[in-house]
Image (cartoon, grey):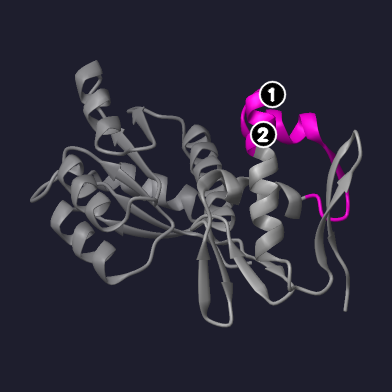
Amino acid sequence: MDKKRILYVEDDETLAFLTSDNLEQHFHVTHCNNGKKAFETFCNESFDLCVLDIMLPDMDGFEIATEIRKRNEEIPIIFLSAKTLKEDRIKGLKLGADDYLVKPYSIEELILKIEIFLNRSQKSTEKASKKYTIGSFTFEPQNYILIQNNETTTLTERESALLKLFLDNTNTVLKREKILTSLWGNDDYFTGRSLDVFISRLRKIFKDEAGVKIENIPRVGFKLVIESL
């Protein structure tokens, strides 16, 4: 498996050497010793996570993070700083940083945090990009759309959540109460009526799709059946 790419920005030569040497055992590390060079490198290369010192020549860590966030809202950012004031930590987090470690830090803690944020970022990316195939339809839950023959049907947020719940439990009976509490947080009469409306709408969308149907299980719930053709 390819190592994840880390942009590490630190102007203290000794600390940078020690930290880079340890990080290189786990990741592919690109080290920059000033802010301007770091930002140029970020713009010209691809990285999975950024580790930024704050006090840097040319362009400080806060400024780098601000510019990075303009271009990439998702990449994890960890600040490393000798600044211990609560105001600095709050400022860093408000700029979109995922964490803020105060020097001297434990290299083991830094590696652990990097791994946690990389894992979280990967799961988030996988979740956001996941698509489902339903017969001749492609379902993109993050965009609330169904695509068939280049024609797009837009779902409401709750319709999309309902369809995703069915797809994650294909050919399995879902109790009515489970569906209602999953989507609405309760199973009262009014949410039950809303569910019936959404079920009807989804059935209408798939009415001409052979092998795809939402079955009503009397006094129990529903089941999305997708038959292999």
Q: Name the residue carrying label 2.
A: 193
Q: Observer-nearest residue: 138 or 121? A: 138
In this picture, residue 142 sits left or right of residue 224: left
Q: Are marks 1 and 2 in contact (CB under 8 Å)?
A: yes
Q: Kindly indicate the quadrant of the structure image that contains residue 29.
A: bottom left
In this picture, residue 213 sits left or right of residue 162: right
Task: Tell me if mark 2 has few (under 14), some (14-19) or many (20+) residues whose alpha carbon lies within 10 angstroms of its own.
Answer: few
Q: What x and y, as percent, mark residue 44?
A: 27, 71
Residue at image point 44% right, 57% down: 48
Q: Observer-nearest residue: 118 or 196? A: 196
Say what secondary structure mark 2 lies in.
helix
Q: What x and y, as percent, mark residue 67?
A: 19, 52
Point out the residue furthest to the top here.
86
Number of marks in the image? 2
Magenta stretch in the rendered image: 169-194
Residue 149 in view, yes or no: yes
Label ID, residue 189: 1
Specify the amino acid type for callout 1. Answer: Tyr
Specify the amino acid type for callout 2. Answer: Arg
